[in-house]
Image (cartoon, grey):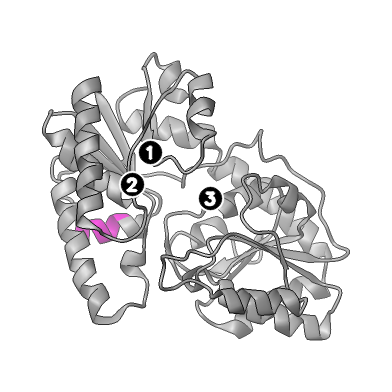
Amino acid sequence: MEFRKEGYEVLAVAHNDSPEVGPALEALGIRYQSVPLSRTGFNPFRDLGFFIRLTQIIKAYKPTHVLAYTIKPVIYGGMASRFFNTKMYALITGLGYLETETGGAFKKVIRMFILKLYRIGLRKSAGVMFQNNDDRTYFLTEKLIGNTTPTEVVNGSGVNLSQFEVTPAVKNPVRFILIARLIHAKGVGLYLKAAQEIKRISPETEFHLIGQIDEHNPDSISTGELKSAIDSGIIIFHGFQNDVRPFLRMASVFVLPSWYREGVPRTILEALAMGKPVITTDNTGCRETVQPGVNGFLIAKKQLEPLVNAMKALLEDPEKIEMMGKASVRLAKEKFDVSAVNNAMLKFMNIR
């Protein structure tokens, strides 16, 4: 909508996971084109189809600016834009599987291939935006972009403070919540283990989980692992939810013990805006959202004990939940307001 305010016509291009997306965008005056995109994996035939369709769309609509984000749109959008000398700006929303610590020799080959594609896709980009300084340093060090490529670090994707409103602190019972794709790199398995530990000493404490199993991801939580945690009463599972606000309202503390290479997790930003303390890892993208001891805790990656201890600290002193929640709201307003983030992006693109 910020582009529309500046007098631009907007065309949104995405894989259509939901039939509601197109009509919702068109109701806002934004045209929409669905494209064949496989989010995970590198099937050369599917990716070629995606690239051809992007090229056709850019040729037909002749945009003055292209803003691409997530790995495949950045890579193939950059390639397609070069055919027509279109200004292409990239938003890097994390490195994800590219820099997680699993995969072995096969992953190393895929990683080299992806890095090569990034270099090709970003070679003529008008500018590249990042959600944290670590990713900008990585792209420069790996020579995915040149030293003369304009870059900017923005505060994540921002959060709409009018949509994610502050809610009262919930202290009795204390309810922890994790919202993520159900993969181990997001810390979901660690969360289940921590819930089991805490339940032994505080049976009334609740552990809520929102998300869906990523069947095409080798790092996915297994159906059996999830079912065991549900059946034993360790967690309360809500599946995938389009609107997480009702669940954040009833929650006390947001937890994301991720070692996934995040940009800045949107779920944490939504939790901050609604006044929730955050327990997350001292990890790229995550550490930007927590002032340790002020609005939550930063813990070591892949370690159960620090996670359990952070949870215990809030259970033993529930007043911290309210105090840290207020600090989360201040941080959301000062750093992650979507209006400020959008303004920074438009200025970088020389639109505002």
Picture residue at 46% right of the left edge, 46% below the top:
155
Q: For the residues carrying marks 1 and 3, which lies nearer the camera in this image? A: 1
At mark 1, the secondary structure is strand
Where residue 107 appears, x then y in whole percent?
A: 26, 74
* Alpha carbons under labels 1 and 3: distance apart: 19 Å
Assess whether residue 111 is covered by the magenta stretch. no
* Alpha carbons under labels 1 and 2: distance apart: 8 Å
Q: Amino acid at mark 2?
A: Leu
- Give the mark nearer the N terminus: 1 vs 2: 1
Q: Amino acid at mark 3?
A: Arg
- Give the mark nearer the N terminus: 3 vs 2: 2
Whether pointer 1 and pointer 2 mark residues with C-beta atoms closer than 8 Å, the reply is: yes
Picture residue at 15% right of the left edge, 53% below the top:
119
Where residue 143 appears, x then y in whole percent?
A: 16, 58
Where residue 329 appears, x then y in whole percent?
A: 67, 47
Asked if residue 296 can be seen in this view, the reply is yes
- How many residues crowd around disc 2 within 10 Å: few (fewer than 14), some, or many (20 or more)? some
Query: Which disc number belongs to residue 37?
Result: 2
* Alpha carbons under labels 3 and 2: distance apart: 22 Å
Residue picked out by circle 3? 266
Placement of the C terminus among the 4 image quadrants? top left
- Give the mark nearer the N terminus: 1 vs 3: 1
Residue picked out by circle 1? 14
Would you place residue 223 above or below residue 327 in this image? below
Q: Is 248 positioned to the left or the right of 40 in the image?
A: right
